[in-house]
């Protein structure tokens, strides 16, 4: 009897063991095969220093000023990229993100809004080229657009539920690209042609009290008059959309593109007082409250993912679309806000193009790590497709971006001599360091900026001189020549649009036509 009981006990234990083993193996392989959810958290006009997370080698006064606890948490769970680049203004970055194409090629080189109208300020010296003022188009035959296969379309085709929330700013009013639903998004929350909100306040109907205001944020009527700041309304709507994804039982791609922290500089009352108490002037306090409000949204979304058990299978990519407002001043204090970087939005200097970037990829990217390998916004396109496991895809456009998945996996590094390019044959705003029509190249530690109007060069060693204070163009003729040749070749190959001179009607020469 005892022996029988013992035998029965052993059989039962063995059976249970196999059941447990089988269920573990099966749930593991199921999970491995499950495509990850992808959350892109794109902030507007947020500078490299507008956070309590230090992206510089040391903690700066700006890191002490701002409070971004959710970003701190994200950085502790993910990998920081200290040299992540975008374009210096909104639409070129957003179109590069959607197409994987460099701005020199997609030709949406400045920001878009009205059909067939350029926002470029009139110029004394240059006639500016006919760039793609209408932005991206998912269909051919729309004038002044880049016809392309948008990233969310490929994700949607592969079975993702794709959500657009916030600022779109992809195409001009009255063109197909203005509506995110035409670009492969299943849901569009509050996105349209305009690149700024009429107002952050629900009491102001987010800018819609005047029906003719092109900046009025669409689709948030239910929040009108409810004392809910725009960032909060967008976050609540994003969570409602995520709930609907759970019901659909599909992986999600959430493009959470806040209007914040773009102008108008309007405080979020939930966070404003403490910055006033910190003795900031009123505009700086308003701005700091907008930064913390944006961060609160990130924290709320991360908390939602935790609560729903989604965090372990969700990749989060945090990025900004251009440098912080500084070159033209904010609150009467010009050109300091991205320090130690020089200048800000609209500038070819680092302050205009270097962004705070963090990627959390659970189980893949080592938490609390940091890399100084550089990358640029068009790299997101092939990276996100690789993350989603989408290998065989075709695109109308040529994809320039290079996947940074190997960097995240720890299986590869950026080529130390990789060349990055910017092309901005435009004028964004008033004068300031690095402002003006220009083309630039980054290669290794070096960066060359070529200004179209007066054909002058700035050559910086970014590693030694991150603030771009010392122009080495005369001191380093060999490096100047090398980079001018690389840049000239790229502009020619890309058929980049160059301005011409008003007086002679001649095209601005390529940089290597000047430096030979
Ligand atoms: Ca922007």
Image (tube, rainbow, N blue to C red):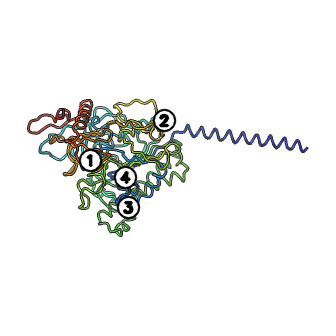
Mark 1 within 8 Å of ligand 1, using the beta carbon: no
Q: Quadrant of residue 118?
A: top left
User: Which quarter of the rendering shows the N terminus?
Assistant: top right
First of labels 1, 2 by sequence position: 1
Image spot of residue 509 (x, y percent):
17, 34
Q: Earlier in the sequence, mark 3 or mark 1?
A: 3
Q: CA distance from mark 1 to mark 2?
A: 36 Å
Does residue 269 appear in this view?
Answer: yes
Q: Residue 260's x, y, as percent? A: 35, 54
Which residue corresponds to mark 2? 389
* Mark 3 closeness class: few <14, some 14–19, many ≥20 residues within 10 Å: some
Q: Are marks 3 and 1 in contact (CB under 8 Å)?
A: no
Nearest the eye: 220 or 85: 85
Q: Is residue 194 visible?
A: no
- Residue drawn at 34 percent across, 31 percent down: 398
| Mark found first going from the N terminus, 4 or 3 | 4
Sequence-first disc among 1 and 4: 4
* Depth order, front residue of 419/16: 419
State the residue position of label 4: 56
* Label 1 CA crowd tier, 10 Å (few <14, some 14–19, many 20+): many
In screen coordinates, is 425 left or right of 46?
left
Q: Nearer the viewer, mark 4 or mark 3?
A: 4
Does 283 sit left or right of 515 as displayed?
Answer: right
In three-dimensional space, the C-alpha distance between marks 2 and 4, rounded to whole angstroms, equals 33 Å
Q: Judging from the image, what secondary structure is the residue with disc 3 in?
A: helix
Residue depth check, mark 1 versus mark 2: number of the one nearer the observer: 1
Give the distance between the C-alpha atoms of the residues marked 1 and 4, in whole angstroms.
16 Å
Residue in the picture at 39% in, 59% down: 292
Please give the residue where the numbered disc 1 appears in the rendered image. Answer: 349
**Residue under label 3:** 64
């Amino acid at each position: 009897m005892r022996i029988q009981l013992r035998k029965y006990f052993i059989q039962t234990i063995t059976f249970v063991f196999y059941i447990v083993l089988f269920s573990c193996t099966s749930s593991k392989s199921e999970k491995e095969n499950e495509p990850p959810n992808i959350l892109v958290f794109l902030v507007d006009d947020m500078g490299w220093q507008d956070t309590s997370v230090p992206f510089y080698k040391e903690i700066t006064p700006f890191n002490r000023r701002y409070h971004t606890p959710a970003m701190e948490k994200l950085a502790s769970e993910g990998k920081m990229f200290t040299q992540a680049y975008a374009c210096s203004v909104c639409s070129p970055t957003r179109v590069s993100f959607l197409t994987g194409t460099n701005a020199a090629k997609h030709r949406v080189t400045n920001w878009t809004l009205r059909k067939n109208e350029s926002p470029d300020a009139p110029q004394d010296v240059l006639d500016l080229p006919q760039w793609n003022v209408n932005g991206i188009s998912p269909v051919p035959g729309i004038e002044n657009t880049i016809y392309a296969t948008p990233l969310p379309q490929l994700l949607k085709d592969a079975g993702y539920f794709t959500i657009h929330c916030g600022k779109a700013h992809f195409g001009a009013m009255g063109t197909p690209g203005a509506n995110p639903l035409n670009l492969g998004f299943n849901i569009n929350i509050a996105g349209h042609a305009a690149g700024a909100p009429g107002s952050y306040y629900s009491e102001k109907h987010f800018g819609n009290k005047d029906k003719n205001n092109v900046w009025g944020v669409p689709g948030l009527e239910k929040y009108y008059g409810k004392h809910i700041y725009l960032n909060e309304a967008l976050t609540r709507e994003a969570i409602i959309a995520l709930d609907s994804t759970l019901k659909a039982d599909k992986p999600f791609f959430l493009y959470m593109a806040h209007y914040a922290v773009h102008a108008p500089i309007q405080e979020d009352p939930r966070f404003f007082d403490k910055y006033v108490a910190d003795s900031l002037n009123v505009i700086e306090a308003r701005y700091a409250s907008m930064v913390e409000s944006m961060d609160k949204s990130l924290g709320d979304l991360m908390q939602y993912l935790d609560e729903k058990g989604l965090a372990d299978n969700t990749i989060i990519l945090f990025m900004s679309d251009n440098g912080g407002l500084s070159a033209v001043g904010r609150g009467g204090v010009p050109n300091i806000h991205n320090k130690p970087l020089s200048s800000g939005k609209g500038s070819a200097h680092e302050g205009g193009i270097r962004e705070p970037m963090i990627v959390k990829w659970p189980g893949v990217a080592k938490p609390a790590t940091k890399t100084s390998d550089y990358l640029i916004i068009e790299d997101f396109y092939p990276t996100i497709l690789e993350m989603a496991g989408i290998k065989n895809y075709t695109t109308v456009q040529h994809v320039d971006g290079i996947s940074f998945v190997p960097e995240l996996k720890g299986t590869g590094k950026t080529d130390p001599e990789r060349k990055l390019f910017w092309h901005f044959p435009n004028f964004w705003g008033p004068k300031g360091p690095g402002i003006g029509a220009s083309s630039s190249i980054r290669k290794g530690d070096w960066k060359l900026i070529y200004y179209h109007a007066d054909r002058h060069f700035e050559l910086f060693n970014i590693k030694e001189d991150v603030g771009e204070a010392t122009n080495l163009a005369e001191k380093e003729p060999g490096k100047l020549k090398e980079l001018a040749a690389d840049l000239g070749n790229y502009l020619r190959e890309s058929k980049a649009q160059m301005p011409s001179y008003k007086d002679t009607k001649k095209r601005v020469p390529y940089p290597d036509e000047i430096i030979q």
